[in-house]
Image (spheres, helix red, strand yellow):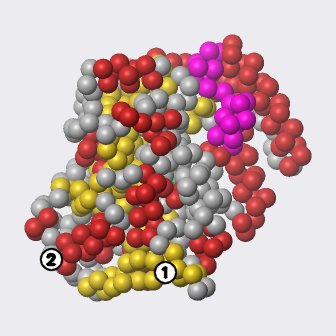
Amino acid sequence: MANTILVGAQWGDEGKGKIIDVLTEQADIVVRYAGGNNAGHTVYVGKQKYVLHLVPSGILRKKKLCVIGNGVVVDPIGLVEEIEGLKKLGIKVTPDNFALSETAHVVFPYHRELDAQREVLKGKNKIGTTKRGIGPAYGDKAARVGLRVNDLIDPALLEVKLAARIKENNGVFKALGAKQLSFKKVFAEYREAGQYLKPLVTNTVVLLHDAMRQRANILFEGAQGTFLDIDHGTYPFVTSSNTTAGGACTGSGVPPHRMDRVVGVMKAYTTRVGEGPLPTENQVISDLLHGMGREFGATTGRARRCGWFDSVATRHATMVNGIDDLAITNLDGLDTVESIKVCVAYRHGNKQYDFVPNDAAVLAECQPIYVEFDGWCTPTDKAKTFKQLPPKARAYLKAIAELSNAKLFIASVGPGRDQTIFV
Ligand code: GDP
Ligand code: IMO
Ligand code: MG
């Protein structure tokens, strides 16, 4: 399969987990390279539903190595819970199939508290974060005051470094009128989690390069989406990592010239959870999808905002990520829509954009310019081949792939493994 980076081409929740699970069949190793447990990747194996937050979605297949790379921020309490939850469902996580980077940064309770406090301070300008402490954890990493997994698994190092961080953060909480953290309690909990995780910790950069020498196929599992990227997204309504393809290199230690292919995952329509501009947002399509019980967040349970497919955004995503192939998911979500709109450009005053403007305030004022497609008004969820799809559905898929400037590779018509059409 060669080394493949898989990224979300919209605002997250594109169905990356499902597509990773399908592509893992041909991979040897699956690597998460960015984000933390703000992610929620849903995979169905038969009727069993799994929601992965930190553990790569490849874990559900046997004899695949799953790696959490250096670019991820790890909440160890959450990770232990996730591993234990998987064990209860019969999925073993051992040093044979799972490796955690020594240099991934650790998320602590003060990060979560700061995340929550900053949202309150922002009031109506809040980001709508997942409150998992992601922003403050990456902030500490950039400020060079973060603790890494290597610190977590060494109780003596953890004790000294954590004491200093709690002291500083308690000073901030005092000024904010927020509750003080108990060093004793946090230290005890984190020491225990660190010792639980210790056997899984390794130098994942060396591990990946050893595997490449043995011609392993590596799949890089993106989290979040292109427009949540700290550099390329709708700042400040973004997450705090590089979610785009470049992040796979820095977040894993695998250099750019060893990457062979980029797969972009996108829904056949658009969704976003949290605040920030979403030019094609539409109440009718939101109500339709929510009425079907779809589009509720896998991590926070929040209703996702929904809208028409935005090809200005996906074209921009192809440019920034270098997307070669597209996996288009949730085609079946449009099965009952008689006339389907696709945004092909934005209008802002008398200016027209065919790329996503950098200023989130400008983007929020952009009016989508739409073309309309006839709906197919037939269920697609049982189709097994591209030919079995209604002609109007095929035309729609081809058109949105072409508008996104990349090749149609997969069409997904349901959450199951067998609802995946290779084009
Ligand atoms: P991720 O974060 O990109 O992995 O996506 P999420 O798991 O957060 O959200 C995608 C949702 O769509 C999940 O509930 C998936 O089970 C579901 N899903 C993925 N592909 C399809 C599809 O083709 N059709 C339907 N009906 N659901 C899908
Ligand atoms: P997956 O991997 C969708 C959004 C939050 C918020 C913003 C910042 O499942 O696609 P953060 O907690 O990261 O500081 O929140 O980013 N967000 C996601 N939206 N899918 C995700 O992950 C997300 N991870 C973060 O809703 O708007
Ligand atoms: Mg998700």
Kindly indicate the quadrant of the structure image that contains residue 139: top right
Prevailing secondary structure class for the magenta stretch in the rendered image:
helix
Q: Split into 4 quadrants, where in the image is the N terminus?
A: top left
| Element under disc 1 | strand
| Element under disc 2 | helix
Q: How dense is the environment of label 1, judged by Cα within 10 Å: few (below 14), some, or many (20 and up)?
A: many
Q: Which residues are magenta?
A: 136-155
Say what amino acid the circle numbered 2 marks. Answer: Pro
The residue furthest top is 156
Question: Is residue 377 something that shows in the picture?
Answer: yes
First in residue order: circle 2 vs circle 1: 1
Beta carbon of the mark 1 residue lies under 8 A of ligand 2: no
Q: Position of residue 14 (x, y in %)?
A: 39, 58
Beta carbon of the mark 2 residue lies under 8 A of ligand 1: no
Reading the image, the residue beneath label 2 is 391
Say what amino acid the circle numbered 1 marks. Answer: Pro
Residue 91's tag is none
Q: Position of residue 132 (x, y in %)?
A: 61, 46
For residue 7, side relative to residue 167 (left or right): left
For residue 123, side relative to residue 141 (left or right): right
Q: How dense is the environment of label 2, judged by Cα within 10 Å: few (below 14), some, or many (20 and up)?
A: few
Kindly indicate the quadrant of the structure image that contains residue 349: bottom right
238 is higher (above) or lower (below) than 383: above
Q: Residue at x 69, y 49 (%)?
A: 115
